[in-house]
Image: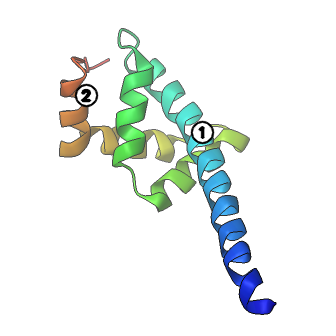
Amino acid sequence: MTILAAPLLISACSAANDVADAVTRDRAKTVVNAVVERRFPRVNAAPVTDCVIDAASAGEILTIARDSVGGVQPATVDLVVDIASRPESVQCIAENGLTLLAG
């Protein structure tokens, strides 16, 4: 019976990890969106936010998500701007027909 339960446990753990990842990404998106709106007020923040989140590492997403609780810290703003400046972010932003204007 234990062997039969193992796939169910693995599946349950995977589902729990997927939920945790989705919650963390959503919290990070809230922070990134706020940073983008403040730094680049004339830009539609949502697509830029998606590009930044997609280019961020798991550790960076966790760091950013933490600021959804205590408020956005200057180091997080710098991190978001750094991620937005990476080639993969710039390409994603360009593919969505967006431009970042220095604010």
Question: Which residue carries the number 2 mark?
Answer: 93
Farthest residue, direction top: 42
**Chain-order first, disc 2 or disc 1:** 1
Vertically, is 62 above or below 43? below
Question: Which residue carries the number 1 mark?
Answer: 26
At a point 47% along the width and 59% down the height, the residue shown is: 58
State whether residue 86 appears in this view: no
Disc number placed over residue 4 in the picture, else none:
none
97 horizontally vs 52: left or right: left
Local crowd at mark 2 within 10 Å, few (<14), some, or many (≥20)? many
Q: Give the amino acid at mark 1.
A: Asp
At a point 47% along the width and 20% down the height, the residue shown is: 38
Percent x, y of residue 73: 57, 42
Q: Give the amino acid at mark 2.
A: Ile
Inter-mark Cα distance, 2 to 1: 19 Å
Percent x, y of residue 81: 35, 38
Q: Secondary structure at mark 1?
A: helix
Percent x, y of residue 63: 55, 54
Vertically, is 78 above or below 61? above
52 horizontally vs 63: left or right: left
In the depicted view, which residue is nearer to us: 64 or 56?
56
Farthest residue, direction right: 1
At a point 41% along the width and 12% down the height, the residue shown is: 41
How many numbered badges does the structure rendering display? Answer: 2
In the depicted view, which residue is nearer to us: 53 or 38?
53
Percent x, y of residue 23: 65, 46
